[in-house]
Amino acid sequence: MVRQFTPCEDNSRDFRDALGCFATGVTVITAPTSGVGIGMTANSFSALSLTPPLVLWAPAKSSERYSFFCEAKHFAIHVLRNDQKPLALEFANNGDAFESVDLRYNAAGVPVFDDCLARFECQTHALHEGGDHSIMVGLVQEAMIGEGTPLVFAQRNYGDFAPRT
């Protein structure tokens, strides 16, 4: 059944469900704080530019962790593998779930971990308004590629992706 609608407050669940039809990868974004650091699961990650190397993600303004990321001068984006759903859930519920990873700190003091599919260590390049989210643009200073297949999120469920050969 096809349903067409104009997005509004009364049908925000329908709008979210429509957006959920677009499968995305799953990331954990980390940033430094005065403590161990802060992390957040996000699927709003996207490539933006090859030259200069820019990526973006969009934290929700309603998140208790929002201000930490918006004030950060540096952050890291960790792309999760298909076997890392528990890690995604940990950081979705807990901003300091670092006991789940083998943690180290990069030169900018950002908590990073190597056990992931890919990682992008960024300097904050720009912060833009985006409705109930902000759009954070990062200038990638270091990148890492691991092995495996990506964890995917679509239609309120986690899954994986198997490329066709």
Image (cartoon, rainbow, N blue to C red):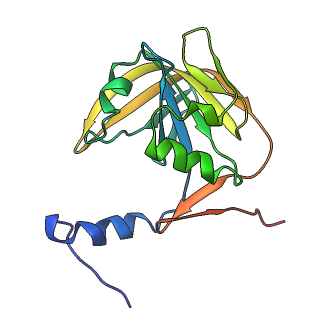
Image position of 111 with respect to 152: above or below: above
Residue 4 image point, x, y percent: 27, 80
| Residue 163 location, quadrant | bottom right
Q: Looking at the image, can residue 93 be seen?
A: yes
The quadrant in which the C terminus is found is bottom right
Residue occupying image coordinates x 23% and y 76%: 5
Q: Looking at the image, can residue 45 be seen?
A: no
Residue 35 image point, x, y percent: 46, 16
Residue located farthest toward the front when viewing the structure as drawn = 99
In the figure, is residue 136 to the left or right of 26? left
Residue occupying image coordinates x 32% and y 26%: 127
In the figure, is residue 129 to the left or right of 58? left
Residue 55 image point, x, y percent: 51, 33
| Residue 8 location, quadrant | bottom left
| Residue 107 location, quadrant | top right
Residue 33 image point, x, y percent: 43, 17
Q: Front-most of 72 and 55?
A: 72
Q: Front-most of 114 and 133?
A: 114
Residue occupying image coordinates x 40% and y 18%: 72
In the figure, is residue 26 to the left or right of 60? right
